[in-house]
Image (spheres, rainbow, N blue to C red):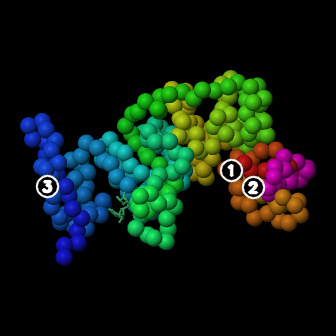
Amino acid sequence: MQKNGKIFTLTRRNRRVDYNDLEWKYLEGDGDFISDEVKKLRDEADFIITNPPFSLFREFISWLFEADKKFVIIGNKNSITYKEVFPLIKENKMWSGRTEWSGGLWFGTIDKNDVDKVIDNKNYKNVSSIWFTNIDHGRRHKPLELMSMADNIKFNKKIKECPYPKYDNYDAIEVCVTNGIPSDYDGVMGVPISFLDKYCPEQFEIVGGSMAYETTACHIMKDYVDLGYKFVKADGVAISGSGALKDKMSPKIMGKGTKDYSISPSGDYLHAV
Ligand SMILES: C[S@@+](CC[C@H](N)C(=O)[O-])C[C@H]1O[C@@H](n2cnc3c(N)ncnc32)[C@H](O)[C@@H]1O
């Protein structure tokens, strides 16, 4: 039995698209996107629309950008922070698709042991994935409606709990929720990664991320281990293993917070966000 994947071709005849004109044949190779056969198809394409293997997402992104094509692809939400992905978003070479991120994406599944919901006897699985594209769409240019700092502190429940603390290791303020971004602050703000879902390039500039490979201009180099900090669990006694307290990139703010925290040699408290 032929095991190779199929290639479908639909040719428009007399300016008419007719499903009955669909033709198909087997690929010669195994369909690996790195193969010359599939690269040739990629190079012929105007648009690449696919759900690539998440485990090869870095390789797939490099394959995609090598060809300089318009694309709409699905990726895992976590992939945003990859060093092969985040710079593309920062430089506006790739952005979130039209579909909002909350709720993930739903896929039909044949694995009966891993089902999140059933509709009309069909099993579906929710995957924390999102669309990425380099095709422009209206939502991307819709600015976020913002309130002033004072109004957020007064009316935004989350901001009320953490009213824009300044980081210890970034020249920036922490904005713990996207809907708490103030309208009247011009400096650098640290926002949740999910902000990218609402990112309008005419309204904001992405200056960097807090990932270990980033060289964000507002980052203040501090080595908390070398500086003699002590890292403890919320009880203030047991030693904390939290990497986010000790590493050089995770943003830290003053105070004990509610989880693990660190204490400077002069007795100041810091916690990770
Ligand atoms: C995330 S799944 C998407 C499956 C299907 N297209 C869908 O949307 O439900 C990724 C698919 O890529 C295939 N795949 C894995 N490695 C690949 C490679 N090197 N080249 C091409 N396809 C690959 C997997 O077998 C899998 O079917």
* Label disc, if present, on residue 271 of the rendered structure: none
Viewer-nearest residue: 159 or 207:
159
Identify the residue under disc 3: 23
Residue 270 percent location from the top left of the image: 81, 49
Front residue (pair 95, 83): 95
| Residue denoted by label 1 | 250
* Dominant secondary-structure state across the stretch colored magenta: loop
Label 3 CA crowd tier, 10 Å (few <14, some 14–19, many 20+): few
- For the residues labelled 3 and 2, the Cα–Cα distance comes to 58 Å
Q: Residue at x 50, y 28 (%)?
A: 142
The three-letter code of the residue at mark 3 reads Glu
Distance from label 1 to label 2 (Cα)?
7 Å
Q: Is residue 21 visible?
A: yes
Sequence order check, earlier mark of 1 and 3: 3
Q: What's the residue at 59%, 45% (across, down)?
A: 193
Q: Is residue 214 covered in magenta? A: no
Q: Secondary structure at mark 2?
A: helix
